[in-house]
Image: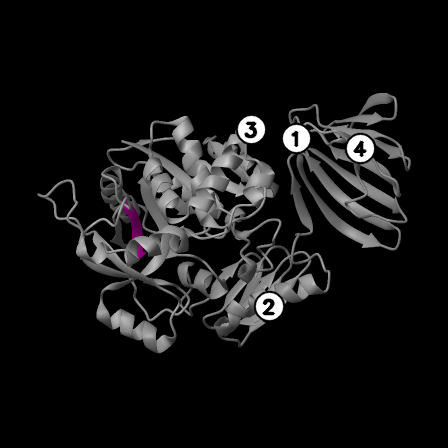
Amino acid sequence: MLIQPVVLSGGSGTRLWPLSREKYPKQLLPLIGEDSLLQATVRRVDGIAGAELAPPMVVCNEEYRFVIAEQLRLMGKPGTIVLEPVGRNTAPALTIASLSAIKIGADPVLLVMPADHVILDTAAFQSVVSQGALLAAGGAIVTFGITPDAPETGYGYIQSGATYTGAPDEKKPSPAKLIARFVEKPDRQTAQVYLDAGSYLWNSGLFMMRASVWLAAVGVCRPDILAACQSAWDQGSTDGEFVRVGKEAFAGCPPDSIDYAVMERIAASGAESGTRAGSLPPGVVIPLAAGWSDVGAWDALWQVLPKDESGNVAQGDVLLQDCHDTLALSEGRLIACVGVSDLVVVETADAILVAHKDKTQDVKKIVDQLKQAGRTEGQNHRKVFRPWGWYDSVDTGARFQVKRIVVKPGGTLSLQMHHHRAEHWIVVSGTAKVTRGDSTFLLSENESTFIPLGTTHRLENPGRVALEMIEVQSGAYLGEDDIVRFEDVYGR
């Protein structure tokens, strides 16, 4: 059986600000261990019993394409990266992935996973996925419901119904149940009722189905979504590992989630009786108890991270004295906490968050304030990743800015020009190949050059080690939009 992992990487993770930013969201961050959440999602499918795994397929915003490609490359798992020109929620994303999967393989079983979730028990996850794969191969749309251990108000719920009788092996009773209904995030009293009933599971956002089954189901439930995605696919193109769809057609696709577009309609159309409604496939849910979390806010991250004897989580340069149940994360500067409980303290190069652990859902409101004020801290880190490497704006003032720039081996910046600034380049380590006007030359450690305002220029790393340099900009305007690109190997 061929299983195609499909990783949906479209979220922005605003409740995990200031680590998660709009231009570098939580799924790209190593919040649990050395892997990013996206890398951990791809890695946890390795070794699923009885299955052949296709290379991973990631559906993402075009802005993240180079970072995701690099993270997959570092894992040794190059795959297909399907680019959404605009966000249209998960149902169109899965429809485009299904069209791509059928083109690549012979109608594989899709394992659809959000890129930003945590699953601590990989073996339990793989065991349940193996069960789901058999049902999906037989024509069902399978979702995995998280076994609840508390009256959680931050998740949607799935009510399970009768046992699914379409199990392929009657000697091994299937844990799958027909989906009775989906319910929205409840208040605490209702959540307690769901917990006591024993028939409700948290909605994980994990799915399995054949690509053709999804396309048929979305064609019945939302033919407008299928038509728009088919048109976008037909207008698309492939550029190496990147698959692009037609921008205008995809922008016209109605936004909707997998749940709303298809799954709720399947549940509402007679799944409890075990009969198919029209041409819709059965929708089934399998319980999953594998240390799952959607890491939706800082309190959720605190819950899944290892703690000391006082319930504290400390990462980076952190000192704690007489503290309890506190999360303190430092990316650089020292954090010292004395006599506090139930706090979240997060330090980054350009922002510090201090919040009570019970109020971490409201961090999104801070991000909204930043956006309304036109500030950049909600969108970008001070350190910004580019396909050629990264830069860090270490200092800025009236008419000047200082950047630390690292260009990976073989990296090439665009051939460009600036209308409003001049630049001084000083090589700290490595070798720089510089194009300045009509001349091209090499710079080594401790050598420098000057790029006058209005001069066409390019920076390249021809060496085998990283090029590190300091750039001093001076001029009337220093914004990143003061770039006129003439050539760019990355297609920007």
The tag on residue 78 is none
Q: Nearer the viewer, mark 3 or mark 2?
A: 3
Pointer 1 and pointer 2: residues touching (CB < 8 Å)? no
- Viewer-nearest residue: 371 or 235: 235
Amino acid on which the number 2 mark rests in the picture: Lys
Q: Secondary structure at mark 2?
A: helix
Residue located beneath label 4 in the image: 416
Where is residue 73 drawn, in percent x and y?
51, 32
Amino acid on which the number 3 mark rests in the picture: Ser
Mark 3–mark 2 distance (CA, rounded to whole Å): 39 Å
Residue located beneath label 3 in the image: 237
Which image quadrant for residue 252?
A: top right
Residue located beneath label 2 in the image: 365
Amino acid on which the number 4 mark rests in the picture: Gln
Can residue 444 be spotted in the picture? yes
Q: 10 Å neighbourhood of mark 1: few (<14), some, or many (≥20)? A: few
Pointer 4 and pointer 2: residues touching (CB < 8 Å)? no
On the picture, is 204 further left or further right than 233? Answer: left
Pointer 1 and pointer 3: residues touching (CB < 8 Å)? no
Residue located beneath label 1 in the image: 490
Q: 10 Å neighbourhood of mark 3: few (<14), some, or many (≥20)? A: few
Residue that extends furthest to the left in the rendered view of this protein: 171
Q: First in sequence, mark 4 or 1: give its number.
A: 4
Residue at (41% x, 27% y) in the render: 104
Which SS type dominates the magenta stretch? strand
Mark 1–mark 3 distance (CA, rounded to whole Å): 15 Å
Mark 4–mark 3 distance (CA, rounded to whole Å): 26 Å
Q: 10 Å neighbourhood of mark 2: few (<14), some, or many (≥20)? A: few
Q: Secondary structure at mark 4?
A: strand
Q: How is the image coloured?
A: one colour
In this view, 215 is above or below 258: above
Q: Which residues are magenta?
A: 141-145
